[in-house]
Amino acid sequence: MAKSSARKHREKLAREGKRNPELNRSIFVFADMRQRATKTKAEKLNQHKHKRSLSYQSDDGLFYCRFSALRILW
């Protein structure tokens, strides 16, 4: 394949004894930074693991208090 003009420029700088711009690149250049579009089954279960149990207990208690108070007033 042909060399790009940017690559030619980098090689020229290296030949002249100047700093190669490739050394300025961070480690994240080669990392896969894409996110998954959908969560796995385990991630979905862990997301709602503790939310469900707490919300059911508190909702039931509030529901009984309100229902019993309304029934007494009528």
Image (cartoon, rainbow, N blue to C red):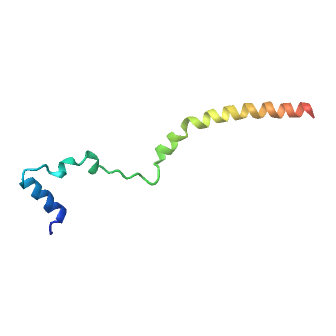
Relative side of 38 to 68, left or right: left
Q: Is residue 26 left or right of residue 46?
A: left
Give 10 or 59, whichever is nearer the viewer: 10
Residue sitting at x 73%, y 30%: 61
The residue sitting at the bottom extreme is 2
* Residue 43 position within the rendered picture, expressed as x and y whole percent measured from the top left: 47, 44
Q: Is residue 41 left or right of residue 71?
A: left
Percent x, y for residue 40? 45, 48
Q: Residue furthest right?
A: 74
Residue 69 in view: yes
The number of callouts visible is 0
Q: Quadrant of residue 71?
A: top right
| Occupied quadrant, residue 70 | top right
Residue that appears at 45% across and 54% down: 37
Q: Dividing the image into 4 quarters, which one contains the N terminus? A: bottom left
Picture coordinates of residue 5 (x, y %)?
17, 65
The one of 65 and 18 positioned closer to us in this rendering: 18
